[in-house]
Amino acid sequence: MKFPMKRAAVVGVLVVGVALSACMKQEPPKPLYDRLGGLGPITGVVDKFVANVAADDRINARFANANISRLKIRLVQQICEATGGPCKYQGQPMDVAHQGMNITQDEFNATGEALAKALDEMGVPAQEKGELLAAIGGMQDQIVGK
Ligand code: HEM
């Protein structure tokens, strides 16, 4: 009678252990693309970003001759791809696209502010906002002073 009780106890401990380890298994974090909500919200961010750039006298003259509808499409593709989404960026590499523009650090910062404001306007949470701004900030060396 003693032995089966012991065995039952051991089995019980094992079952609880397996159940616990299954509960504690961490799901891999979702790609930023999914956490942003996909193409709809990303397109919203780009629309607001371009509107903020157009309203900012520190940088809007730079875009006087720009093809805005193409630029928006490229920005959506770029953000989608950079955040792990299913798109393929079809524009020029950043250093080529901004070649000869002599973009200053202040102009780059102002553009970053326009993006940060767009993310706030779209209600993007702090974590996702920080991750996207960091990804764009990483392009600085390919854009400033080219
Ligand atoms: C903040 C980081 C930036 C990103 C992610 C970015 C992204 C892009 C992209 C994707 C394009 C389109 C390239 C193509 O069509 O092949 C582009 C073009 C352009 N960018 Fe930027 N850019 C940034 C910063 C800036 C800054 C700071 C300025 C100037 C203040 C600027 C001015 C322009 C202009 C004038 C064009 C050409 C648009 C046209 O001719 O249609 N960009 N940029």
Image (cartoon, rainbow, N blue to C red):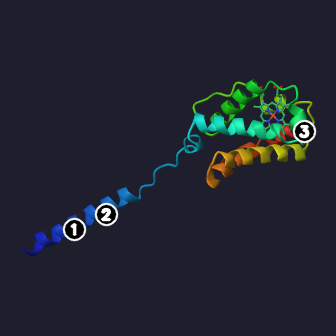
- Residue 102 x, y percent position in the rendering: 93, 36
- The circle drawn on residue 98 is none
- The circle drawn on residue 10 is 1
> Mark 3 vs ligand 1: CB under 8 Å?
yes
- The circle drawn on residue 17 is 2
**How far is the residue under mark 3 from the one under mark 2?**
59 Å
Which residue ends up furthest to the bottom in the rendered image?
2
Ligand 1 in which quarter: top right
- Please give the name of the residue rendered at 57% of the width and 37% of the height, measured from the top-left corner: 38
For label 3, count other residues whose C-alpha is less than 10 Å away and answer few (under 14), some (14-19) or many (20+).
Answer: some
- Residue 79 x, y percent position in the rendering: 67, 36
Local SS, label 2: helix
Q: Tell me the kind of residue under disc 1.
A: Val
Q: Tell me the kind of residue under disc 3.
A: Ile
**How far is the residue under mark 3 from the one under mark 1?**
69 Å
- The circle drawn on residue 103 is 3
Which residue ends up furthest to the left in the rendered image?
1
Snapshot quadrant of residue 103:
top right
Of label 1 and label 2, which has the lower sequence position?
A: 1
Residue nearest the observer in this picture, 51 or 76: 51
**How far is the residue under mark 1 from the one under mark 2?**
11 Å
In this picture, is 94 found above or below 124? above
Local SS, label 3: loop
Q: Nearer the viewer, mark 3 or mark 1?
A: 3
In this picture, is 127 found above or below 96? below
Residue nearest the observer in this picture, 55 or 87: 55
- Quarter occupied by the N terminus: bottom left
The answer to whether residue 45 is left or right of residue 93 is: left
In this picture, is 127 found above or below 93? below
Snapshot quadrant of residue 145:
top right
